[in-house]
Amino acid sequence: MSMAVVGMIAGMALGFAGYFGGFGAFLLVAALGAVGFVTGRFLEGDWELGDFFRQRDERRR
């Protein structure tokens, strides 16, 4: 499935949630979509947990 189709489906889901459920449902669907996106990236191996939790350099202090 192409990224354009995935984006279209995500946009339609957010649109339906916003229209039928209000702004709270829109935010919930958007947040769960972001969690699913990040989880998918981790499972595919594109990201690693260490990318987000690296220690600072000594020079940056």
Image: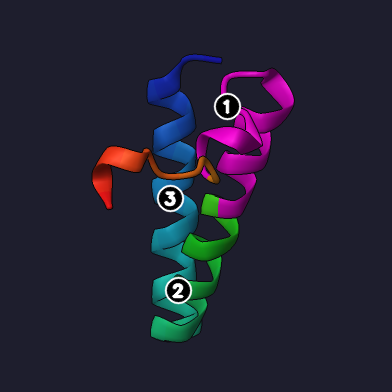
Give the residue type that dot 1 points to.
Trp
Instruction: Indicate the quadrant containing the N terminus: top left, top right, bottom left or bottom right.
Output: top right
- Picture quarter containing residue 60? top left
Task: Please tell me which residue lies in front, 23 or 45.
Answer: 45
Image coordinates for residue 25, horizontal then vertical, percent: 51, 78
The residue beneath circle 1 is 47
Which is more N-terminal, label 2 or label 3?
3
Image coordinates for residue 55, horizontal then vertical, percent: 49, 44
Numbered mark located on residue 23 in the image: none
The residue beneath circle 2 is 27
Point out the frontmost of discs 1 and 2: 1
Magenta stretch prevailing secondary structure: helix
| Element type at mark 2 | helix
Q: Which residues are magenta?
A: 35-52
| Element type at mark 1 | loop
- In magenta segment, residue 23: no
Task: Please tell me which residue lies in front, 40 or 56.
Answer: 56
Image coordinates for residue 56, horizontal then vertical, percent: 41, 44
Q: Is residue 18 left or right of residue 41?
A: left
Q: Residue at x 52, y 34 (%)?
A: 51
Marks 1,2: beta carbons within 8 A: no
The residue beneath circle 3 is 12
- Picture quarter containing residue 58? top left
